[in-house]
Image (spheres, helix red, strand yellow):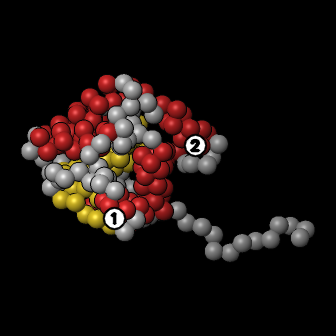
């Protein structure tokens, strides 16, 4: 593993524990010689994380749509900034650049990006492991939702194990290093009519 895509909030939240988690993750990436791939912004947890990696001598690759660059959202101290056409291209580019995906606490955008990455893994379009850095139990309700998906058979038990929720960065790294992608889903090629129709 060489590069980790991190999805996180453009705000810092209302508890210092979230900012500290971004600092801890930044330090962890540098110590383990892992480059950061992220959305390219300089505010919120995104900015805290990027600055920490850079301050510790690490590499930071930002990926940002042109419209956000035009609004002045790009962090100007990055190792590299890749400007893309739109958000969909940004997500695809980040996955292509990275070897794993981690979600820090964040809002709807953070959630949408990491969930899409996991969904694509089940389709065979993403080989990257996905993990939630579950700081201060932030993602507990979501973990419960995924468990409910499994209980109600909308998600297989095997695939549920392919998504990690953890507040331990060492555990997250081990999960990523030993990860194998989900088996690609297959579908029947012929549909049979219901009896009596």
Q: Nearer the viewer, residue 196 or 76?
A: 76
**Identity of the residue drawn at 43% across and 27% down:** 137
Q: Is the residue 165 above or below the residue 96 in the image?
A: above
Q: Quadrant of the C terminus?
A: bottom right
Q: CA distance from mark 1 to mark 2?
A: 39 Å
**Foreground pick, 6 / 100:** 6
What residue do we see at 25% from left, 63% from top? 82
Among numbered discs 1 and 2, the one appearing first in the sequence:
1
Residue drawn at x 15%, y 55% is 79
Task: Look at the image and tell me whether residue 183 can be seen.
Answer: no
Outermost residue, bottom side:
190
In this rendered view, identify the residue nearer to me: 61 or 132.
61
Q: Quadrant of residue 91?
A: bottom left
Q: Could you tell whether 146 is left or right of 197 in the image?
A: left
- Secondary structure beneath dot 2 equals helix
Which residue is rendered at x = 56% and y = 48% of the image? 155
Which residue is labeled 1 in the image?
A: 66
Residue that protrudes farthest toward the right in the picture:
196
Q: Position of residue 28 (x, y in %)?
A: 19, 37
In this rendered view, identify the residue nearer to me: 169 or 43.
43
**Left or right: 114 with respect to 174?**
right
Q: From the top left corner, tell me how far across and down residue 187 is, in percent.
A: 60, 67
Task: Provide residue 30's location: percent of width, then percent of height.
Answer: 14, 42
Q: Can you tell which mark lies on residue 150?
A: 2
Q: Residues within 10 Å of mark 1 (few under 14, many from 20)?
A: some
């Amino acid at each position: 593993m060489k590069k980790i895509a991190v999805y996180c909030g453009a705000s810092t939240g209302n508890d210092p524990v979230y900012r500290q988690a971004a600092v801890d993750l930044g330090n962890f990436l540098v110590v383990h010689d892992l480059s950061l791939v992220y959305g390219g912004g300089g505010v919120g947890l995104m900015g805290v994380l990027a600055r920490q990696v850079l301050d510790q001598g690490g590499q930071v690759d930002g990926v940002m749509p042109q419209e956000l660059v035009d609004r002045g959202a790009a962090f100007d101290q990055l190792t590299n900034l890749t400007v893309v056409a739109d958000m969909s291209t940004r997500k695809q580019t980040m996955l292509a650049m990275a070897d794993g995906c981690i979600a820090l606490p964040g809002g709807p955008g953070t959630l949408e990006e990491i969930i899409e990455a996991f969904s694509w893994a089940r389709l065979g379009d993403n080989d990257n492991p996905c993990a939630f850095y579950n700081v201060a139990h932030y993602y507990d309700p979501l973990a419960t939702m995924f468990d409910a998906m499994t209980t109600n058979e909308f998600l297989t038990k095997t695939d549920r194990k392919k998504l990690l929720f953890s507040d331990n960065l060492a555990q997250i790294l081990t999960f990523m290093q030993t990860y194998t992608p989900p088996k690609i889903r297959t579908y029947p090629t012929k549909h049979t009519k219901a009896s009596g129709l």
